[in-house]
Amino acid sequence: MNRLLGLLALCALTACDAEDKAPASNEPPGFCSGTQLFGNPNATTGLTDEQCRPTCTDCGAAPYLPPTFDDAALATLTTLVNDTPSALLTGDPYAEGSADPIPEGSVCAVTPMTPGHYRLDTFGSASEARAAGAEVTHVGLCGQCSSLNNLAVYIAQQDLTEPVRACGLLAMRENDAAALDCLLALGFDEPCAQIWQFNTKHTQLKCLGVCLAALDDPYHLPDGSLNPCLVCDEVQSGPVFKAVAGRTRRNSGLPNALCRPCSEVTPLEHNYAFESSVSGG
């Protein structure tokens, strides 16, 4: 029984780091080009540091180096108050059918409000956001994972495979409430934890056979492509996740253990109101 739970839990890992689903067609506020792979490979990635790096070189005037956050800056992100929080999901978005297309060029942006507070708004373009005094935080519509608290989780945990796998196991051993509590313990706020949980369950439903066959595979094949389990997750669960979650690491310009072509990465600085604690970009 424990072995079966472990196998089923593999499908949870496809949700954990495959939250960066197939890219949206949006034109980001500035973007890189080329097929160079962007990410932070680890022992499970299956690629070398030469094949995948946390930088993109073909980005116009200068290479893109993702911002680095010290502990104080990450702590600040988690304490800032979002005055426009997402409502909790009242049902499984995967049961509602296909997701609506993400409007071309749309961005989610942060506007500082009173000290320690900010608001999130969707704008039709990066230029509209800048004209309104807002800082783009990711490409696409604002959603369940767009808050700066969730940005801090994505920065701090660049490979969520093992912790989210553990949360998937809790759903099968105990119940959905235990799995949600597990995701919350990773640092996600509740709106974001909900869509991660629904994503994990949907991938388990749609990709079980493929993921069992790829049980011991690294994330990437030698040619740099994703393994079949992660591809299944992107196809089956990706569109709804992106539409509902809003933020992914790829559309936020953040490297992780899954490597992506630089042409699919949005370069962003994430400076906001505490530039002195943030470097890079």
Image (tube, grey):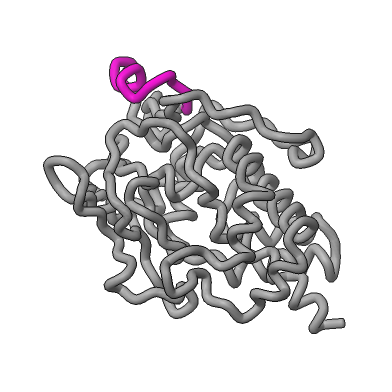
Residue in view at x 49 percent, y 77 percent = 44
Q: Nearer the viewer, residue 177 or 65?
A: 65
Residue 131 counted in the magenta span: yes
Image side of residue 208 versus residue 229, left or right = right
Q: Position of residue 89 (x, y in %)?
A: 73, 36
Residue in view at x 59 percent, y 72 percent = 162
Q: Which corner quadrant holds the N terminus?
A: bottom right
Q: In this picture, which residue range is highlighted in magenta? A: 120-133
Q: Nearer the viewer, residue 36 or 41?
A: 36
Residue in view at x 79 percent, y 83 percent = 3
Does residue 1 appear in this view? Answer: yes
Q: Position of residue 77 (x, y in %)?
A: 41, 46
Q: Position of residue 251 (x, y in %)?
A: 43, 43
Image side of residue 59 versus residue 216, left or right = left
Q: Position of residue 30 (x, y in %)?
A: 28, 35
Q: Is residue 280 above or below residue 185?
A: above
Q: Nearer the viewer, residue 24 or 180?
A: 24
Q: Is residue 89 above or below residue 199?
A: above
